[in-house]
Image (cartoon, rainbow, N blue to C red):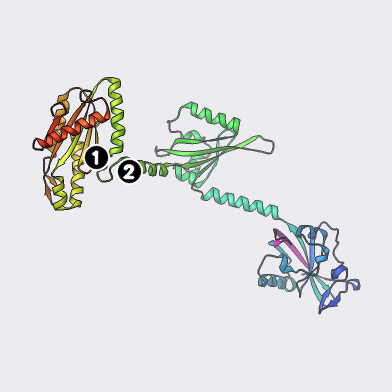
Amino acid sequence: MKKINFGKEFLCRRSNNIHYALGKKYYCCSLDKDSLEIAYAFHVESKIIVDATQAFFKLFKYNAEDLGEFSIYDIVVAEVEEINANINRMVNHSLTEIPLRQYQSKDGQLLFISSSFKVAQLGSEQYLIATLQDVTEMQQMRNRLRLASQVFEHTSDGILVTDVNGIIQFVNPAFVKNTGYSMDEIIGKTPKILRSGRHEDEFYREMWRSLHTEGMWRGQINNKRKNGEIYSEWVVIDAVKNELGKVTMYCGIFRDLSERMRYEEKIRFHAYHDGLTGLPNRILFYEKINQYIAVAKRYNHMMAVMYVDLDGFKHVNDTLGHDKGDLLLSAVALRLKECVRESDFVARLGGDEFTLIMPEVTKKQDVELVAAKITNQLNQTFELLECSVRISTSVGVSIYPTDGEDVDSLIKEADNAMYQAKASGKNAYRFADDA
């Protein structure tokens, strides 16, 4: 490293065995104070800063009165050992530049600085003169770009960028993963490649109207993966403008809602279905029977409601245990579903009570066939983990509109008919108008 020998006019006075340059409060006159350069000089042995330009004072929030009172350790953000090692390399091993170093100003503001150094020899004392370049704004921009790049690469949301004509320019790895299309397959295409056919053309026209007038669009959309699977996404699209306010690109963020919707569907299922048998529960039963009555009224047709109660279930539960009782209830649910049409509705109200709704029937005899089939099927032997069980059932039936035109009336009449079937000796069915 080049060494600069100062003339006699720069000899320093001695104070506590430390040399300082001549000048106000012991700082050198060697630096051009009015220079636009950000520069300072410090004493190699003591590390005290003895001279600086006005540009340095402005950037680091110090003033000339502070010279001699602060050191290199006060402005360079690094461990003391690292600072000392770098100074040694500058003085003895020709280190002249440090491309990027974090500094801090007097008020604690962090700065990014690139620096070059020269050794100044003043008598027997050595000084380092540092010329700095403030690259804080550039480094912060780089950090923001690096962070944006990391977000772009690692976010779980799909990101898509198109030009003003809607031609896809960039997609991130999450977009590739979510859609199943590779980069080569998607870049150069338009987002139409994702259309599921679930939305009308007006839906997309409204989307573009919003982008043109408001510069953004937000909403849920059904898209199609490469494998043909339809899935829901929450999409945020923004128009990106230049400094003149002209749209230069569109950026879309796609959040796959499939997992959330599956979770919500699971929650809804458990809210409306019996946890043991998987059949609709009491809540869904009442919701459905109201709907079916409304339809029957509108189209003027009959419907049937059945109450099914198991005969002898308590004995199975008490003698064989609740695990066998649960298996029996699940098996009963399967047999009941086998006894009815696909359009019919089977529910478990609780315990050993089940209900059926036949939403549309043409004559009473059709309902009687189903009731007879149920009593016959549930009177067959059940095999429960190497344990054979046989029960019977009592069924009560009410018909809309003969036995009632509202929910309470139909349920009450079916329940009464079921108890009449039990009273008759069980393993039987009874209609409300026969009870």
Outermost residue toward the right in this view: 9
- Nearest the viewer among 91 and 216 is 216
Callout 1: 10 Å neighbours few (<14), some, many (20+)? many
Is residue 340 among what the camera can see?
A: no
Q: Which residue is mark 1?
A: 348
The N terminus: image quadrant: bottom right
Assign a secondary structure to mark 2. Answer: helix
Looking at the image, tell me whether mark 1 or mark 2 is earlier in sequence order: 2
Residue 435, position as x, y percentages in the image: 13, 29
Residue 32, position as x, y percentages in the image: 86, 61
Residue at the (72%, 67%) spot, across then down: 74
Assign a secondary structure to mark 1. Answer: strand
Outermost residue toward the bottom in this view: 17
Q: Which residues are magenta?
A: 103-118
Outermost residue toward the top in this view: 300
Q: Which residue is mark 2?
A: 270
